[in-house]
Amino acid sequence: MNIATSRAKPVERLAAFVADLRFEDIPTDVVAKAKIHIADTLGAALAGARSAEFGLARKIAGQDGKTRLWGTQAFASARDAALINGVAAHAFELDDAGGCDHSGAVVMPAVLAAVSASEHAVSGKHLIASVVAGYDVGRRVLEAAGGYDSHNSLGWHSTGTCGTMAAAAAVANLQGLSRQGCVDAITLATSFSSGLWGFIHDGSQAKKIHAGRAAEGGLLAATLAAEGFAGPSKVFDDVWGGFFRSFNKSSGEPEKLSEALGESWKVNRAVLKPYASCRGAHSAVDALEDILQETQQEPENIISMHLHLSEMLMGMCGHKGSNSMAGTQMSLPYALAARCVFGTAGLDAYTSQCRSDPRVGAFMQRMQLEIDRAMQPLDEPVLTLIFSDGTRTSRMVPRATGSAERPMQREAIDAKFRQLGGMALEDDRVSNLLNVLDTLEQFDDCRRFETLLAGDADNRPTFR
């Protein structure tokens, strides 16, 4: 059966796209975008090797394996490494967003685990194509499930639920699965979809495991499909037990799985994160930066802050900090206060010492947060600052730094990579890795990443 025909189901057309995608099919600008996100994810993961969550997760790994735990001298089985490296990539909230949601943290650990298990050389071109395929599938599944607000507002964390299919597709492309094999990989992955927003209420570390489980589940699904394990053929149909009915209580929009394939490249939808917090806090930090720059005021002159925000954003990021690092990174008020007190909302502002700084608490006491019922769930907040001289200024940033509308400059992207990579690697190794990633399409064998990503995070203190 030719599943690329117009009579094919959307998931079959999507699987055909995944199976057939080659580097030469991908526009130059999309290749460049994918390379940035590959490097960004690895930088975030190398830093994450210093996280408490990474240290805890690696305790469950078996003793046998040949897949690198990034940033260390240790190895694990491919599936254990996909899980643990996925935790590392998402640990500090510095991995990309806007895909499935956190596509890099689910795709890259799965893909490089599959590379390490390969008996043959995997070129940089092949790696790029597999990553592009993964980003496409993860975002398309989320859009077909009603989009971020519809799916996540029910309590599902789309990084875990939709990211599993992203990882499965990426590995399926890398392994050269047939079209039917890609159908099986993607549909099998739905059985490993999981992840709830329950972590938001108490600062739980559970969110960090979602990316790892999605990477592990996607790798498992593709590996089973390669052996002929059949997936549920009707899982994206309007049936009892189907993905859309189960995860969105509706029939979904399955046609979005294959809409504009090869024209609308979903990696272009992904965004970088300059701040070490939930993406929901980033636009407000940008608004603060803009106001301070334009008014030439200092943060200490702020006597009050007022935020109008959607009900969804209030529930997700409206709390004023937490004792735990994981909980604090989900706090919009903390991100604003950290920028005012420490001059940054980057990772250095989230240490235990910073979190307990009384100046941060004092700044958060100046903030008033108010739900605006007229706002849509994904609308960005409106920030109003009142200064000691009576000046009152409001600002809403529609797309935060790291997006296509407000891109991070290349210097900032490289600086982020060097800072994060340097948390696990020596400076010369960071520079070498960045050079390889900059010219990834010329790289002959990605199995060499097993050596390039070896570091000494085990000999450095846990970042808390």
Image (tube, grey):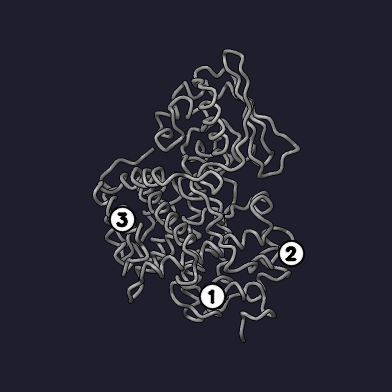
- The residue to which callout 2 is attached is 251
What amino acid type should be assigned to the residue bearing mark 3? Answer: Asn
Secondary structure state at the residue bearing disc 2: loop
Image quadrant of residue 352?
top left
Image quadrant of residue 128?
bottom left
Image coordinates of residue 119 in percent, x first then y, are 33, 76
Image coordinates of residue 313 in percent, x first then y, are 64, 40
Residue drawn 52% across and 48% down? 207
- The residue to which callout 3 is attached is 435
Residue drawn 37% across and 59% down? 61
Q: Quadrant of the N terminus?
A: bottom right
- The residue to which callout 1 is attached is 182
**Disc 1 and disc 3: Cα gap in Å?**
33 Å
Asked if disc 1 and disc 3 are in contact, CB closer than 8 Å, the reply is no
Secondary structure state at the residue bearing disc 3: helix
Q: Quadrant of the C terminus?
A: top left
Task: Report whether 157 appears left or right of 355.
Answer: right
Task: Report whether 262 appears left or right of 32.
Answer: right
Secondary structure state at the residue bearing disc 1: helix
Q: Which badge, 2 or 1, is on the more N-terminal residue?
A: 1
Q: Nearer the viewer, residue 214 or 136?
A: 136
Q: Nearer the viewer, residue 95 or 127?
A: 127
Image coordinates of residue 240 in percent, x first then y, are 72, 68
Image quadrant of residue 351?
top left
Vertical relation: 312 (above or below) 18: above
What amino acid type should be assigned to the residue bearing mark 1? Answer: Cys
Vertical relation: 21 (above or below) 411: below
Q: Nearer the viewer, residue 154 or 4?
A: 4
